[in-house]
Amino acid sequence: MSVNLYEDNKKIKIIGIDSLEDSLKVIYGEGGYLYHFDDETFVYKEGLGDMEVVSNVPTKPIEMERIDDPVEEMRNLGVTFEFIDISLPENSRYRITAST
């Protein structure tokens, strides 16, 4: 899966096998939690990506939210999914192969 964090285009590319729905189920499963943190304790450090930060002290979330169906939530927000089936010959460039 790839997500471009530099553009807010609300498109997620899913690279999987068989179907988009099967792949989304594997990736997002039965939901999970979204944690909200106070941004005052987070700082950028050399070696992190452009959009990554770290906290130097233990920190607790200020809010924790259960997301039962992340895919439905994303779709409600206008996110679209592009599916690439790597089992198809025309998508072989997306496969990871072992070096011989």
Image (cartoon, rainbow, N blue to C red):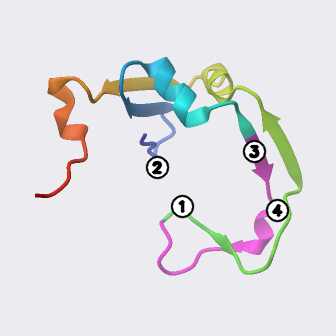
Task: Indicate whether 44 appears above or below 28.
Answer: below
Q: Of the residues shown, which amino acid type is indicated by label 1?
A: Met
Q: Which residues are magenta?
A: 33-49
> Residue 40 in the image: x percent, y percent?
79, 70
Q: Residues within 10 Å of mark 2 (few under 14, many from 20)?
A: few
- Is 45 contained in the magenta span? yes
Residue at screen point 73% across, 39% down: 32
Under circle 4, the secondary element is loop
Q: Quadrant of the N terminus?
A: top left
**Mark 2 lies on residue:** 6
Residue at screen point 50% across, 81% down: 46
**Mark 1 lies on residue:** 51
Q: Residues within 10 Å of mark 1 (few under 14, many from 20)?
A: few
Q: Are marks 3 and 4 in contact (CB under 8 Å)?
A: no
Q: CA distance from mark 3 to mark 2?
A: 21 Å
Q: Residues within 10 Å of mark 4 (few under 14, many from 20)?
A: few
Q: Of the residues shown, which amino acid type is indicated by label 3?
A: Leu
Q: Nearer the viewer, mark 1 or mark 3?
A: 3
Disc on the earlier residue, 3 or 2: 2
Q: CA distance from mark 1 to mark 3?
A: 18 Å
Disc on the earlier residue, 1 or 3: 3
Under circle 1, the secondary element is loop
> Residue 37 in the image: x percent, y percent?
80, 58
Disc on the earlier residue, 1 or 2: 2
Under circle 2, the secondary element is loop
Q: Which label belongs to residue 62? A: none
**Mark 4 lies on residue:** 38
Disc on the earlier residue, 2 or 4: 2
Q: CA distance from mark 1 to mark 2?
A: 9 Å
